[in-house]
Image (cartoon, rainbow, N blue to C red):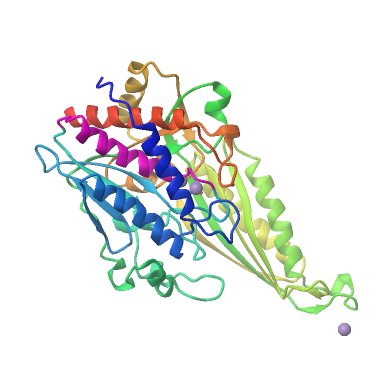
Amino acid sequence: MSMITPARDRVAAELTEQSTLTDSDRPGWTRRALSEFDVSGREFARRLMRQAGMDTRIDGAGNVIGVLPGCLGGRQIMLGSHTDTVDGGGRFDGIVGVLGAIEVVRLIQEHGVRVDHDLVVVVFFNEEPNDFGLFCVGSRAMTGQVDRSTLAATDPSGRSLAEALPKSRIDPGDFLDAAYDFTPVTAFLELHIEQGPELERAGRQIGVVETITGINHFRALFTGRQDHAGTTPMDVRSDAGCAAAGTVLAVESIAESGANTRGTSGQIRFTPEAVNVVSRNASLEGEFRGPEGSWLNEAQRRLTAAAGSEAEKRGVEVEIEWTTDDAPVPLHEPITTTITEVADELGLTRATMFSGAGHDAGVIAAKTQVGMIFVPSVDGRSHCPEEFTDLADIMTGISVLLETVLRIDRR
Ligand code: HGY
Ligand code: MN
Ligand code: MN
Ligand code: MN
């Protein structure tokens, strides 16, 4: 063990500064991708990388990539996470993994630790769901999982992602050329807040992630008939809003049918939006998550059937599009074991975990060996302004990240 301690005040100051780069017109700490705030959030991380002596660049998909050359060079260990947030989000989701990775690079240099691998720190562009029905956009671009249909994805106003990218200083013409060569990458590690209650409940300091949840996002568009709310009898209506509402309840009951399974209807919109008009259209966006691909396939089938029957009984048409179909991702067992050994040798309490949240690590796992380290979330809260993790726990997570890097480097 190297017994190097992260610099608490430095990381605290950076967390605070990063939290000021947010949209003050929105609740909480809002730094959504494809906004000017997201540009400054990624720029801030880039500046820290430069100050840490890293060579930095931004690839065609807006990923900030910093490199600290290793003593042997050639092979790489990649670390990173994201700086974008959900609307009304918190200060820790993603950011802890970015600042933690940069702190690891600084500690290695300040303490003159010999590292053979190049250390590559990545701030992934647009991890959280955007208005185009996409998420983990930067990590998908780095792993070659984007194509023309990604650029053509539309938001509710009909605008394409290609049209929106310049707001993030991304040239849509470069977007499809951001594939990264993972051949030299030995491993990818992501430090993250748990975002749920398990570590705190169990009184453990470190979560060692075994599997990242599968995530299937859908968009359903219901088309009925617009009518007068006072004169149209109930039995002759084709109310698109009611069909969507029935489908919301189906999402809930389907999700209650599995272990560690989740279903959420996060967005619903009626058109027209008027108190005295029967809705012509209703759009519903939601998702299912779970640890088993077979359950997710079954959930898709049941939801399609439920939406069809809610629509049919009201003379409404429905179209469903599955915008994301990510299977659960088991993480690399030898790396999980290494993280566990590191936690034990540092005398930390730990738990093996399933991640109900999605992460860039799950996307990167298509290309290299991946491990994830969780630190506790106070009251299990996340994706809300109350999201909080104690600085002491963040320091512990950074120590585990550093030691894991050093172990993988020496293998
Ligand atoms: O939605 C998620 O699971 C993640 O926090 N982006
Ligand atoms: Mn998130
Ligand atoms: Mn995150
Ligand atoms: Mn009238």
Q: Nearer the viewer, residue 147 or 233?
A: 147
Q: In the displayed structure, does residue 365 sit left or right of residue 229? A: left
The image quarter containing residue 309 is bottom right
Q: How many marks?
A: 0
Indicate the position of residue 406 as horizontal and vertical percent values.
23, 29
Q: Nearer the viewer, residue 111 or 125?
A: 111
Indicate the position of residue 16 as horizontal and vertical percent values.
46, 45
Question: Residue visible at 34% across and 57% down?
Answer: 43
Q: In the displayed structure, does residue 106 sit left or right of residue 18? A: left
The image quarter containing residue 152 is bottom left
Dominant SS of magenta comes to helix
The answer to if 105 sits in the magenta stretch is yes
Q: Nearer the viewer, residue 282 or 187?
A: 187
Q: In the displayed structure, does residue 50 sit left or right of residue 35? A: left
The image quarter containing residue 138 is bottom left
Q: Is residue 143 visible?
A: no
Question: Residue visible at 49% across and 22% down?
Answer: 204
The answer to if 382 sits in the magenta stretch is no
Q: Is residue 302 visible?
A: yes
Question: Residue visible at 52% across and 64% down?
Answer: 131
Please state, as top left, top right, bottom left or bottom right, where the N terminus lies in the image: top left
Q: Is residue 225 depicted above or below 34 in this figure? A: below
Provide the residue span drawn in magenta: 90-114
Indicate the position of residue 120 as horizontal and vertical percent values.
24, 45
Q: Nearer the viewer, residue 308 or 359?
A: 359
Please state, as top left, top right, bottom left or bottom right, where the C terminus lies in the image: top left
Indicate the position of residue 56 as horizontal and vertical percent values.
23, 54
